[in-house]
Amino acid sequence: MSHPDLFGDLPSDGPATQAAAQPESPAARAAQLRDSLHHHAHAYYTLDAPEVPDAEYDRLFRALQALESAHPELLTPDSPTQRVGGQVLDAFAAVQHRVPMLSIRTETDTEASGAEAFDTRIRKELGLAASEPAVQYVAELKFDGLAMSLRYENGVLVQAATRGDGETGEEVTANIRTIGQIPLRLPLDAPAVLEVRGEVYMRRDDFEALNARQRQRIAAGTKGEKTFVNPRNAAAGAVRQLDSGIAAERPLSFFAYGLGDITQATEGGPQWTTHFEMLQQLKVWGFPVAEQTSCVNGSAGLVAFHQRMAAERDALPYDIDGVVYKVNDLALQARLGFVTREPRWAVAHKYPAQEEMTTVQAIDVQVGRTGKLTPVAKLAPVFVGGVTVTNATLHNELEARRKDVRVGDTVIVRRAGDVIPEVVSVVLDKRPPEAVPFTMMTHCPVCGSLAEREEGEADHRCTGGLFCSAQRKQAIWHFAHRRAMDIEGLGDKLVDQLVDSGQVHTLADLYRLQQADLANMDRMADKSAVNLLEALEKSKQTTLGRFLFSLGIRHVGEATAKELARHFGQLDAIMVASEDALLQVADVGPVVAHSIHTFFAQAHNRDVVQALRDAGITWAEGDALAPTDMPLAGITVVLTGTLQSMGRDEAKEKLEALGAKVAGSVSKKTHYVVAGAEAGSKLDKAQALGVPVLDDAGLALLLTGEKP
Ligand code: IVH
């Protein structure tokens, strides 16, 4: 493991050197530990390239903590142990900014032309003729957090202040020390006084994790906890925490983008003449600078950056609300100067907002192609993320209740990129007193069939199956599938047209189609129509397994359908089978048995089956397996571990062929557990329940039809 040894040489991009021998004096040891921790914090938080495991960092951290509590005089304001917070304030102290924190002019035109307008203005103010070369700019991201001024004196972070009104901010040093990305001390070549300006923000993943934790706390009944509307609010809340221990629990990040107060550069120290060079120097001193920050030329360069970032915006791990353009040359910046509180040399070029407020006019329930019921908030139209949004999915009842969205509520809607618009949260202050919680309906809003939510599932589903018109298209498409009824030429698009035009209401209607009906469909040549009719005719001769699969009964896949056909032999037997009888089929568990039973219990599903039979669909019916005649009928076996004589699949097949049921888990109803090498919990359970355990020899005996 590599330990850094970096007295006065922090932070470094180079590899950490071997640790020096452990110093004798506590003061030297504390200094060495601080150096190591500073180095590792920079590698971890800012460079995203940790050099040691977390546990090693923790070990160094605890060593320093122990040393500081034994020798309190060794505690320095730049000690990494001061990052954990703990200070509780009554109020924040006011901080007079020595160099005002300016705001920035916003270009209202969110199109690319906004960038051109800025360049035109700059050229005019600088008196540049059209023939003169392009102005160089630095293009940056406009981070959606809050502005912060970090003051370093003699290389140590002594004060962090919010912007406030630009003249006077609030001192939030203890909270800002908890941000791992912010250096607590600077290398020796930094000016005696340096104020770094930048944005404190919260990453989206950190925000999600924080809100998940907040929800748990609320659920556990912790008083005074709430979730946050967006990362910016969460960041602002954390920065303005009077208890820095709480701030330390809220993961914040930082990007540097400018300077405030600064003393003359030291002789031989770093110099810069452009904004970009200054940012590079801040990076060298350990401050995070966004990698997207670019030097570009003229309006074309600005427009290209604006477009590139618009495309990358949603993939960034944090929110931006636009980009910022700054004249690169500091001498030109000085010439341009300021108007009131805004520099003439910079502009913010925004993107359309991704979050807006609107009201919920209704909550409709839509039925999807698979019968899933989805509550959808009907919104007063709102322009967000570049489009007008009138609907936002609430996903399911649990989600709608978790967000507690009610008709009449004012909500925050978010649309990022191509992502489906979402209700982020409710503005509770604006809730009308009569608003009632949302409840999912008990019946399908389209066909009136029972709507059910299965245990452990979030979604309600319409049980109407083929009867429900909303599910019809999907059902027809599935019916026609190559592995189902195999109707070649009946694709998605055609199904949509047939249903939308009212030609096909039920599956059986497919078999009533005439060439004239098909002639009216888009992209349907005579030849294709003839082919389709032939495919329909051909599909009438099928197998029971295919037919069962084609009905699209939930949980009944191709293999289960075949197994049902093999087991029962005849459709009528399946249609009247009890759940218990269905459970006898290999691979059919309680969920599947329930689904099959419910499907055939509904008269309209039976009608569909009858109509299809009437349309001429036939198959060769077989005899049901006579389970009681088979040697291992009624016997349930569980296979576990590695068998020597054969693979588990082979054993399963052989056992089933003799009428045994092979189950996946051991219960009191299990007759035998066949255990091979390295059998685990199933063997334990068998022994606990007193179920007989067989080895390879026992299995061989069982396969002769004899019960050991
Ligand atoms: S420069 C002299 N650069 O936007 C210009 N500001 O009013 C001072 N912001 O709240 C600001 N990203 O916190 C600058 N790359 C960036 C920025 C940025 C976000 C914020 C800043 C302030 C507002 C500007």
Image (tube, rainbow, N blue to C red):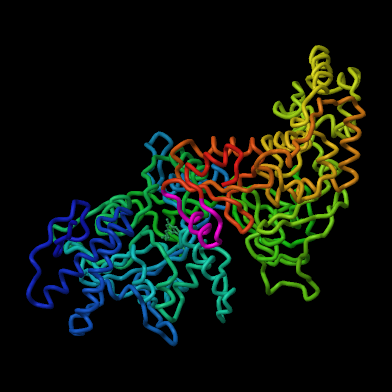
Give the image location of residue 338, x and y in percent.
42, 60
Q: In the orientation shown, which residue stands out farthest toward the top?
A: 527
Q: Is residue 11 magenta?
A: no
Query: In the image shown, does 444 or 91 lie closer to the viewer?
Result: 444
Camera-nearest residue between 191 and 357: 357
Quarter of the render that holds ligand 1: bottom left
- Where are the magenta residues, as a range? 678-693
- At 77% from the left and 23% from the top, the residue drawn is 487
- Residue drawn at x 70%, y 36% is 563
- The image quarter containing residue 624 is top right
Is 48 on the left or on the right of 212, as rendered? left
Q: Quadrant of residue 524?
A: top right
Q: Where on the picture, by quarter, is residue 334?
A: bottom left
345 relative to 297, above or below: below
Percent x, y for residue 253? 40, 62
- Asked whether 328 or 306 is in front, the reply is 306
Residue at x 40% of width, y 42% of height: 128
